[in-house]
Amino acid sequence: MLHGVLLITLFSCAAFYIGEMDFVTSLRLSPMIVGIVLGMLYANSLRNNLPETWVPGIQFCSKRILRVGIVLYGFRLTFQDVTAVGLTAVMVDAIIVVGTLAIGMFVGRLLKMDKEITLLTSVGSAICGAAAVLGAESAIRTKAYKTAVAVSTVVIFGTLSMFLYPVLYRNGVFDLTPEQMGIFAGSTIHEVAHVVGAGNAMGESVSSIAIIVKMIRVMMLVPVLLVITWFVARAAAGKSDMGEKGKINIPWFAILFLVVIGFNSFDLLPESVVNFINTFDTFLLTMAMTALGAETSIEKFKKAGAKPFVLALMLQLWLIFGGFSLAKWMMG
């Protein structure tokens, strides 16, 4: 196992190095995204030469280390963030999350898509991009290539949103106040890094609100994962010959994620320690993403087809038009 873990660690170090390059930072691409790209490049080149004894180490990174990374992600949040923007912003976030999940599952059914890819893509669009996809993947324990497909859709449309929103806002197409624009951006752009990039391009008055609203969206990952787990258990019960009640496996990492947010809300640790934990957490999530990429070949992407990207496009249109209308109406 150790050889596989060390391999992924080296790839993750490379992802951090590449992530600091000017071109990559200008696109607001986190090391996590660079990591999955490196992993996929490896999967489609040297992967067949990998000794089979290394595979358990790669799988350890994509499963166990992933869950530890999600737990530590809670150090980026506090419950004070919720009170800072008010109840209306929380309601906008909730409507966007529920609406995106509902529309995603409906469109996925119309397109006759794989249910797990549909769910992962919808969760990524609804909450916080790649991190949400990883959280959902841990709850349903699906195949690595399905996770990679879902991550690629949210990265593409999240990046497009990061550039599109500031242009439309600056040119008056998004006729919103800075507060409304902050709520709109925070509740509809996929990745946290993309929200930071778009917010900075629109000014501090927009950025500060957008980031807080986005982090509240991240908190909603916990109830969503609990609901997903319940549905997975229910589906398993329906397939059982005896009709027995499905066992609900509570995603412990989601509960600990909430506990960490509560601990962080008391501001007991020095800022330098929290910053170190956040950097370490990013590295762990980068390892998880790299490991997932290492299990994803071109053939598996072809198997998924174009439908996941059509679904992501439909969800993107909902996020733009639905989010704009909500921000305009509820904050008007």
Image (spheres, rainbow, N blue to C red):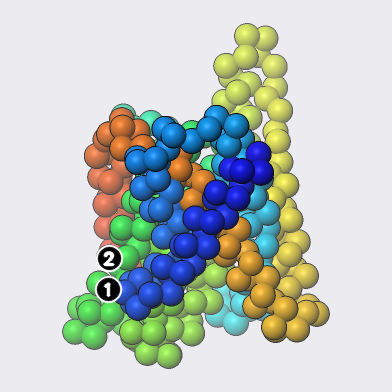
Q: Mark 2 points at which residue?
A: 160
Residue 92: x %, y % from top left: 47, 67
Image-based side of 89 in relation to 188, left or right? right
The N terminus lies in which quarter of the figure? top right
Most foreground residue, 44 or 303: 44
* Circle number at residue 163: 1
Q: Which element carries disc 1, helix, strand or loop? A: helix
Q: Which element carries disc 2, helix, strand or loop? A: helix
Marks 1 and 2 close (CB-CB < 8 Å): yes
Residue 106: x %, y % from top left: 36, 39
Most foreground residue, 122 or 69: 69
- Give the residue displayed 22% in from the left and 78% down from the top: 168
Image quarter of residue 246 = top right
- Give the residue displayed 31% in from the left and 37% down from the top: 298
- Give the residue displayed 45% in from the left and 56% down from the top: 35
Residue kind at label 2, given as amino acid type: Leu
- Farthest residue, direction top: 241
Residue 152: x %, y % from top left: 36, 51
Dot 1 crowding, Cα within 10 Å, few <14, some 14–19, many 20+: some
- How many labels, in total? 2
Is the residue 165 above or below the residue 121 in the image? below
Image quarter of residue 266 = bottom right
Dot 2 crowding, Cα within 10 Å, few <14, some 14–19, many 20+: some
- Farthest residue, direction right: 268
* Circle number at residue 85: none
- Give the residue displayed 75% in from the left and 68% down from the top: 262
Q: Does residue 142 appear in the picture of this structure?
A: yes
Image-based side of 130 in relation to 140, left or right? left
